Image (cartoon, helix red, strand yellow):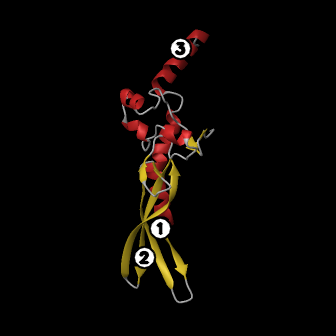
């Protein structure tokens, strides 16, 4: 049985009301952060660094993404929300940490190292907006109807087109 044009629109409206337009982006990003990043690190396992004196074996452990933050000029570190990053032309990102194990003649040394910053998708599991109800979002100056699914890079909203 074929659906009429009106039935097709009703089905589409129902789907978008239930799932939204950006759910696949958010789900994909959340899976990348929660699973794929660690799988990549596990696959690489580590590296060898050769120096004129000897070769060092470096193993990679757990990778972790912290919460979005900004480091001010005076060195102060604090949480940052998407609105502020837009206004100040900042990137909405969070530090990425990797446990590195140095094998030095059987003696292993573990160190957690900041290996860079990861852009945070607005409204993803890592986004600070995902932890607030609409009233709280209004009180901090954010849009309570924000759907997310994009990044903020140097204050500009950027979408990945699939």
- Residue topped by disc 1: 45
Q: Position of residue 35 (x, y in %)?
A: 44, 51
Q: Where is residue 43 in the image (x, y as percent from the top left)?
A: 49, 63
Q: In this view, does 64 lie above or below 110?
A: above
Location of residue 136 by image quarter: top left
- Residue topped by disc 2: 102
Q: In this view, does 44 lie above or below 77?
A: below
Residue at coordinates 48% horizontally, 53% vertically from top-left?
72
Q: In this view, does 55 lie above or below 11?
A: below
Query: How many residues crowd mark 3 within 10 Å: few (<14), some (14–19), many (20+)?
Result: few
Residue at coordinates 51% horizontally, 87% vertically from top-left?
54
- Residue topped by disc 3: 10
Q: Is mark 1 on a helix, strand or loop?
A: loop
Compute the Cα span from label 3 to label 2.
59 Å
The answer to whether one can see residue 1 in this image is no
Query: How many residues crowd mark 2 within 10 Å: few (<14), some (14–19), many (20+)?
Result: some
- Locate the C terminus by quadrant: top right
Residue at coordinates 53% horizontally, 32% vertically from top-left?
22
């Amino acid at each position: 049985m074929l659906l009429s044009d009106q039935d097709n629109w009703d089905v589409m409206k129902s789907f978008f009301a239930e799932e939204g337009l950006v759910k696949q982006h958010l789900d994909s990003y959340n899976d990348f952060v929660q699973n794929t990043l660690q799988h990549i690190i596990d696959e690489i396992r580590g590296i060898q660094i050769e120096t004129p004196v000897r070769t060092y074996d470096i193993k990679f452990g757990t990778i972790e993404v912290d919460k979005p933050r900004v480091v001010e000029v005076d060195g102060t570190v604090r949480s940052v929300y998407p609105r502020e990053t837009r206004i100040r032309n900042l990137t909405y990102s969070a530090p990425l940490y990797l446990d590195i194990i140095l094998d030095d003649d059987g003696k292993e040394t573990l160190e957690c190292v900041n290996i860079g910053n990861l852009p945070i998708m607005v409204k993803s599991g890592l986004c600070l907006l995902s932890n607030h109800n609409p009233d709280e979002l209004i009180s901090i100056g954010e849009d309570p109807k924000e759907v997310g699914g994009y990044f903020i890079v140097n204050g500009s909203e950027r979408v990945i087109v699939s």
